[in-house]
Image (cartoon, rainbow, N blue to C red):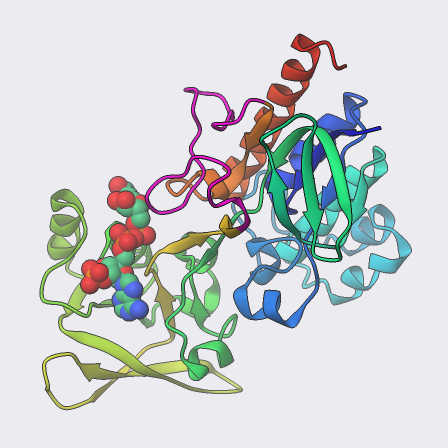
Amino acid sequence: MPEKVVIVGSGPAGWAAAIYTARANLEPLVYEGAVTEENRQDGTLPLGQLNLTTEVENYPGFPAGDLSHYLKDALDSDQAWLADMHQKEGCSGPELMNLMRQQAKNFGTRIVTDDIVEVDFSGHPFKLKSSQGEAVDSLAVIIATGARANYLGLESESKYKNNGVSACAVCDGALPRFRSKPLVVVGGGDSAVEEADYLSKFASQVYMVHRRDELRASQIMAERAKNNEKIAILWNSQVGEVLGNDADGVTGVRLTSTVGEPDREVEAGGMFVAIGHTPNTRFLEGKLEMTDKKYLKWTVPFRTNTSVEGVFAAGDVADDYYRQAITAAGTGCMAALDAERWLAAKGFH
Ligand code: NAP
């Protein structure tokens, strides 16, 4: 018997889809991803990008406060260690993701800790294969594999991730560690300007480090950067090394010039990398329609349909614009409802 719905991915989109499809008696099977060194390096471990962040202050429902008792009570005993690690400041990314996973489990979601590496959507039921070689057939599929932030790839950058290096100003920018300090934003696109502008509310100064002498950002965003007194653009520059120490985290960056000027050091309490994201769609190449940046295409306005009928997409894998936990969870819910209605219309459920 084929599965009714398989969900691939375990960020907020995947778990929201699981909660909704489980409650609709579709008995979802979630492939949450494999725990491998390759996935760790890539930033594609189970529970997605939020599991790599610290505090989450913008997900509604979790104001600042001590959640340790709640975590102990809500999570299975094998996850109770999260309650002991709790920082008493509201919800962290890993806590939020484990709570979502638990909620999906409570409604009967089955979870496999493996990657889907191959799909065949040419016939029906759809065929999927995991990295361990397990084959699964399903009547409907929800893809929620998310995206990963691009980083520069420097060793010093990895060393200070979550200790002053971030790829999300909206997630981390308001943390006390970044307040009233000079900060560096790397990149010259709309995201970099948006991050710099956002950070300028908290920082004493924001340096945008861009490798060329012209921004990629749209005219209106470029004007915003240039008109913001707190933003200084450091042209023709690349970050060669992130400077810091274990106690303080990031203390600055060493910049190299792309036009042959001497290296220089800039003092900074944090570095935000805004050089784009890569959607996790490699295993879907040639199987579903994608944008030129390899994001899945939603083919019907305000729906989560993909180019294959019965396959739906939710979260950052199909959204390079909002990229928030709340929007991912929202589209996860939409994909679940779309899948449920599609299965019902086809008489499968
Ligand atoms: P993007 O437009 O691809 O820009 C990436 C930037 O990072 C570019 O300036 C690029 O430099 C730089 N970069 C890439 N790799 C680099 C590396 N290894 N070292 C140093 N710099 C590097 O990406 P995005 O800014 O994330 O925007 C993605 C999409 O979302 C765009 O379509 C954008 O318009 C949209 N967006 C819109 C808004 C808004 O309208 N409010 C906000 C955010 C995003 P080069 O310029 O030299 O290539």
| Residue that lies at the very extreme toward the right in this rendered image | 77
- Left or right: where does residue 101 sit relative to residue 342? right
Chief secondary structure of the magenta span? loop
| Ligand 1's quadrant | bottom left
Q: Quadrant of the N terminus?
A: top right
> Which percent across, then down, holds residue 149?
44, 59
| Label tally | 0
Q: Is residue 273 left or right of residue 224?
A: right
Residue visible at 11% across and 49% down in the picture: 223
Q: Nearer the viewer, residue 128 or 305?
A: 128
- Residue 75 percent location from the top left of the image: 83, 50
Q: Which residues are magenta?
A: 283-309
120 vs 243: above or below: above
**Compared to 180, does 328 lie above or below?**
above
Q: Residue at x 58, y 29 (%)?
A: 311
Image side of residue 208 versus residue 48, left or right: left
Going by the picture, which residue comes out furthest to the front?
Answer: 123
Q: Is residue 281 magenta?
A: no
Where does the image place residue 121, in percent across and percent down from the top left? 59, 33
Relative to the observer, which residue lies in front, 46 or 168? 46
Residue 292 appearing in the image: yes
Is 300 covered by the magenta stretch? Answer: yes
Q: In percent of the image, x 62 and y 47: which residue is there? A: 118
Left or right: 143, with 256 as reference point:
right
x then y, percent, for residue 323: 45, 44
Q: Quadrant of the C terminus?
A: top right
**Can you see residue 204?**
no
Quadrant housing residue 242: bottom left
The correct choice, above or below, for 164 with respect to 188 in the image is: below
Quick one: 345 or 117, which is closer to the camera? 117
